[in-house]
């Protein structure tokens, strides 16, 4: 069903182009027909619905876990604005629109609308352009239409969504907020006679990795910030009210994110979080889950930021220990978690090898029929994209287009070996699941290899093993003396 949807809209667009050229429609007629075909932003779209289901399935394949906390904070029967942090390009809006029941309208940077086909598709995806100073001062006036459309969306009780930061960072750091959210909200309320009662949903998005396959994503929806609470101040002093609402949103979003404030030691604090995070959670006697680890990591990085501010000398010593330990791990091709005493058990290696042996046929099936598109897209993204935050977006878009084509070609190649329509259909449907299982087999293989390497060091390179243990214990001891539970 999903592939014909793509073909249908592509065919309709090309047909419209040929038809308009043939009869030489003027610009106004063309724009009118495009608006009619794409429908208004606030209208529910059947094509969008089908595309959403297709992307949702791809999202399920890509992620290990998808967790949405705070759905009860989304109010009913009032206009709402989603205001999330922005760190990972297109993955951020996907994290919200795929896991809520809405068809939210998004505001995006105007430079991605320059290509006519791209602009057409973006409109279909319910994305409106926002012009910035870098797009040219003369372009800023075009925001008036965007703001007018945004107000109409809110008046029709369709969720609006935009990033208060107005840029993505590619780091676990919040950027300063801009004035777009307060401006749109206040203009909408003013036009409606202050009767809309707009609720802004502060949203925090967290990824275990920004681009790696099989990652975990957590979406935290916070308690709404009500526009009505600022309308009285807005009537007296619009600039002051705008600043107050902007600050209120920042303060509401920050507790929902992992925000490492340090500029100088960002990478080092991120390394400490990765190495020491689960140990810090264990010290709090809390049971592991992605959500509990997220909250524990919030507390951990907050204390690291405080240590940098109040004890710079101790922090510098901690950084030296961290870098030295990380360098030693990298030298021996190991991960820190392998040095936990629970991983010394040789029986785990035997058990994992047995699982790997039994699961090898599934790995082989998944690898053979998924390797070409997976590694090709991955290779292109690594070479062409300098900004790591765009990798997951690039992989998602190309994957949505490329994988179905490859699967159909592979079905055609083996169809003679598969009797009956149902067996062919079962084979086709199994391919993405087999690919995901193959990746999990590969991860287990790497973990088993790491355990085996560590066991070898423990038995035959005792000096190296003792050195690794000593450096880890010294790092942990230093952290325990600086960070309270």
Image (spheres, rainbow, N blue to C red):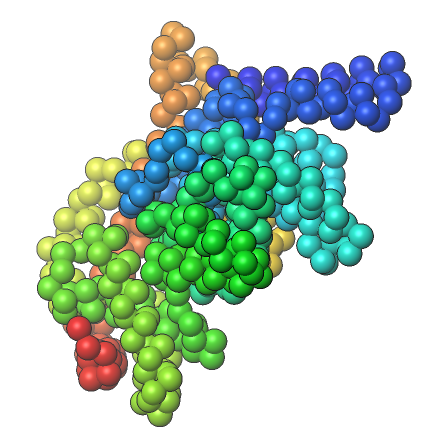
Q: Quadrant of residue 278?
A: bottom left
Residue 167: x %, y % from top left: 57, 57
* On screen, residue 358 above or below 136: above
Comparing 320 with 177, the one in front is 177
Total residue callouts: 0
Residue 109: x %, y % from top left: 64, 48
Residue 295: x %, y % from top left: 26, 60
Farthest-out residue, bottom: 313
* On screen, residue 382 above or below 176: above
Residue 313: x %, y % from top left: 35, 92
Q: Quadrant of residue 118?
A: top right
* On screen, residue 14 above or below 341: above
Q: Quadrant of residue 187?
A: top right
What residue is at 48 percent from the left and 51 percent from the top?
A: 231
What residue is at 22 percent from the left and 56 percent from the top?
A: 292
What residue is at 27 percent from the left and 56 percent from the top?
A: 447
Residue 442 as seen in the image, left or right of residue 359:
right
Would residue 169 be visible to someone looking at this image?
no
What residue is at 22 percent from the left and 61 percent from the top?
A: 451
Where is the C terminus found, in terms of image quarters? Answer: bottom left
Would residue 312 be visible to someone looking at this image?
yes
Residue 78 as seen in the image, left or right of residue 325:
right
Residue 288 as seen in the image, left or right of residue 132:
left
Farthest-out residue, top: 420
Comparing 295 with 273, the one in front is 295
Comparing 1 with 180, the one in front is 180
């Amino acid at each position: 069903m999903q592939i014909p949807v793509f073909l249908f809209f592509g065919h309709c667009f090309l047909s419209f182009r040929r038809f308009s050229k043939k009869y030489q429609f003027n610009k106004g007629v063309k724009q009118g027909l495009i608006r009619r075909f794409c429908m208004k932003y606030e209208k529910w779209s059947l094509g969008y619905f089908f595309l959403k289901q297709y992307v949702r399935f791809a999202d399920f394949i890509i992620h290990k876990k998808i967790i949405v906390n705070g759905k009860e904070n989304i109010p009913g029967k009032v206009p709402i604005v989603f205001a999330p942090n922005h760190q990972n390009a297109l993955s951020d809006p996907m994290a919200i629109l795929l896991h809520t029941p809405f068809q939210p309208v998004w505001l995006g940077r105007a430079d991605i609308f320059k290509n006519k086909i791209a602009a057409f598709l973006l409109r279909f995806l319910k994305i409106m352009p926002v012009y910035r100073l870098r797009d040219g001062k003369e372009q800023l006036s075009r925001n008036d239409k965007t703001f007018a459309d945004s107000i109409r969306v809110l008046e029709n009780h369709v969720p609006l969504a935009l990033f208060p930061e107005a840029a993505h960072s590619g780091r676990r750091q919040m950027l300063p907020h801009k004035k777009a959210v307060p401006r749109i909200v206040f203009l909408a309320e003013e036009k409606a006679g202050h009767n809309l009662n707009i609720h802004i949903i502060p949203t925090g998005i967290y990824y275990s990795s920004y681009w790696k396959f099989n990652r975990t994503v957590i979406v935290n929806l916070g308690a709404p910030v009500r526009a009505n609470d600022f309308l009285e101040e807005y009537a007296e002093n619009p600039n002051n009210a705008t600043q107050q609402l902007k600050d209120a949103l920042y303060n509401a979003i920050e507790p929902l994110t992992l925000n490492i404030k340090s500029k100088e030691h960002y990478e080092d604090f991120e390394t400490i979080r990765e190495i020491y995070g689960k140990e810090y959670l264990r010290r709090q006697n809390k049971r592991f889950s992605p959500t509990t680890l997220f909250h524990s990591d919030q507390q951990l990085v907050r204390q690291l930021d405080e240590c940098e501010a109040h004890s710079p000398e101790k922090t510098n010593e901690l950084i030296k220990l961290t870098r030295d330990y990380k360098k030693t791990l990298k030298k021996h091709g190991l991960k820190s978690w392998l040095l936990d005493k629970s991983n010394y058990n040789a029986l785990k290696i035997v058990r994992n090898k047995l699982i790997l042996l039994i699961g090898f046929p599934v790995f082989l099936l998944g690898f053979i029929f998924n390797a070409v598109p997976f590694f090709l897209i991955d290779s292109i993204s690594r070479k062409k994209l300098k900004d790591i935050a765009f990798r997951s977006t690039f992989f998602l878009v190309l994957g949505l287009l490329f994988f179905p084509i490859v699967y159909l070609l592979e079905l055609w190649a083996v169809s003679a070996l598969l009797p009956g329509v149902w067996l062919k259909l079962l084979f086709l449907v199994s391919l993405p699941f087999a690919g995901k299982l193959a990746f999990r087999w590969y991860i287990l293989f790497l973990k088993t290899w790491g355990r085996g390497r560590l066991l070898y060091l423990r038995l035959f390179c005792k000096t190296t093993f003792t050195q690794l243990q000593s450096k880890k214990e010294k790092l942990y001891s230093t952290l325990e003396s600086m960070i309270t539970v």
